[in-house]
Amino acid sequence: MSINEAISFLDSLGQFRIKLSLDRIIKLTNIFGNPQNFFKSIHVGGTNGKGSVCNFLSKILQYSGYKVGLYTSPHLMDIRERVKINDNLIGEKEFLSLLNIIKERFSNFKEDTPTYFEVLTCLAFLYFKNSGIDFGVIEVGLGGRFDATNVIIPEISIITSISHDHTEYLGKKIEEIAFEKGGIIKKGVPVCFGGKSPTAWKVIKKIANEKGCEAFWLYDKKISFKRIISGGKKGFQIKTLKDDYEVFPSVNGLFQGENIAISIMASEILRERGFNIRKDAILKGIENASIEGRMEILDGKPKIILDGAHNLDAIKKLLISLEEIGIPSFVLLYASMKDKDIENISKILFPKAEKIVLTKVEEIRGEEPENIVKRASLKRDFIIERNFGKALEKAISLSSTSFPLLVTGSLYLVGAFKRSYKRC
């Protein structure tokens, strides 16, 4: 099996064959002796910020001397980006070997075969077990309660934020979404919540009480964080009950303050649980973490900003961060999945754009550019180019020093950009 054949096989399984049950992943991991039980883990869910928090914590643990597996999704360019150990992608040979081993056991399932995400989750667990990692930092795929990653028993559960996204699966009310996200809370395992919503916190606290575990809320006034500038560098000052931190991350975005604060909170809780996580490791981990596709700035002519924001809350945070760095307007290259809140996103994003180029990057789930126009209900001149390569060329040609290029709306769009940009 080649890597292209492997991708075709995984695509054939279906990425969004939703089943409100953990039966398939439990059966699959049971077949392989539950590899997820052979290493310590951290479970990170939430609507926005979970990828950033996973990367911060992975780096913090590495600087603390641990061998760390990192499982995230989706990937931008290479499927192997989802499975890393100490920042190194799983090797192609190991990836194909493990995928073949899993595929051979599909006869156990008859008709109800595992999905794309379930197979990759099991593959990551097997790789981490075989490699003898100390810690696995595991990002939830969708929701929490019935997510394939929810077979782990972590040292700590983290819910970064809760806002409206995937409402067809998770519910339309914040309480419903919080209940689904809170499904990763395990008996006796502490949980951290980084979102602002008191409504969501009430639901999470209730679940935690029922499961007999401590719950910590970033916005309960016991932790504070604010933007600081020193020596021309932008950073954050975070004060906890235990310590004070001044961090100057390499990643951009005012919104990262919240993600950094919850990563510090989680690190301190892990230290209290007996793990060797030093303050200097926390600072080094945060300052050296790199996160592709989240407020990623490519300096040049024109300047290009890449951000995978795909829901209203993430777009709001992106616009605030752009204002902070002196970019009030831009040329926009935009694409979205069909299930996103284009109606409300367009109301705050599109008026900020000098020019708007609409395209499509995901054949099945991607929204047609013409439908984006209809759903936006704005009287604007849109440039529609369904072919992504041509759309990118057009967007770059319209950009300038005064109006840099913003590529946002979907991580699939950011991935398409990264694959195509060097060829333009």
Image (cartoon, rainbow, N blue to C red):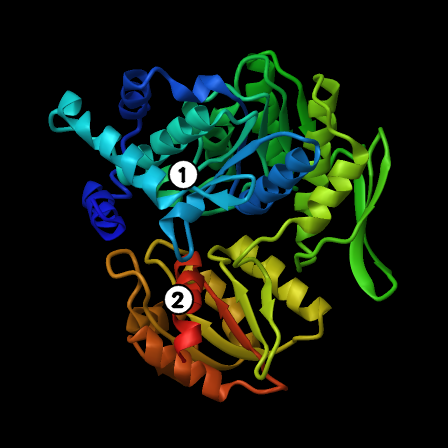
What label sits on residue 149 in the rendered view? none
Instruction: Check the picture and name the quadrant holding the C terminus.
Output: bottom left
Q: Which residue type does callout 1 highlight?
A: Gly
Q: Residue under circle 2?
A: 419
Q: Residue 369 vs residue 256: left or right?
A: left
Specify the quadrant that holds the N terminus: top left
Which type of secondary structure does the marked residue at label 1 adopt? loop
Above or below for 245 versus 294: above
| Residue pictured at 62% horizontal, 15% vertical | 213
Nearer to me, 305 or 60: 60
The mark nearer the N terminus, 2 or 1, is: 1
Residue 304: % across, % down: 56, 74
- Residue 299: where, in percent of width, then height? 62, 75
Q: CA distance from mark 2 to mark 1?
A: 34 Å
The percent coordinates of residue 255 (x first, y second) are 66, 54
Q: Residue at x 49, y 32 (%)?
A: 181
Is residue 145 visible to the viewer in this orientation of the structure? Answer: no
Q: Tell me if residue 12 comes above or below residue 184 in the rendering.
A: below
- Quarter of image, res 193: top right
Q: Determine the residue positioned at 31% across, 16% down.
A: 30
Would you say 106 lies left or right of 357 here? left
Left or right placement of residue 422 versus residue 30 in this view: right
Q: Mark 1 highlights which residue?
A: 171
Q: Position of residue 86 (x, y in %)?
A: 56, 39
**Residue 119 shows in this picture:** yes
Q: Judge by depth and name the residue closer to the eye, 218 or 402.
A: 402
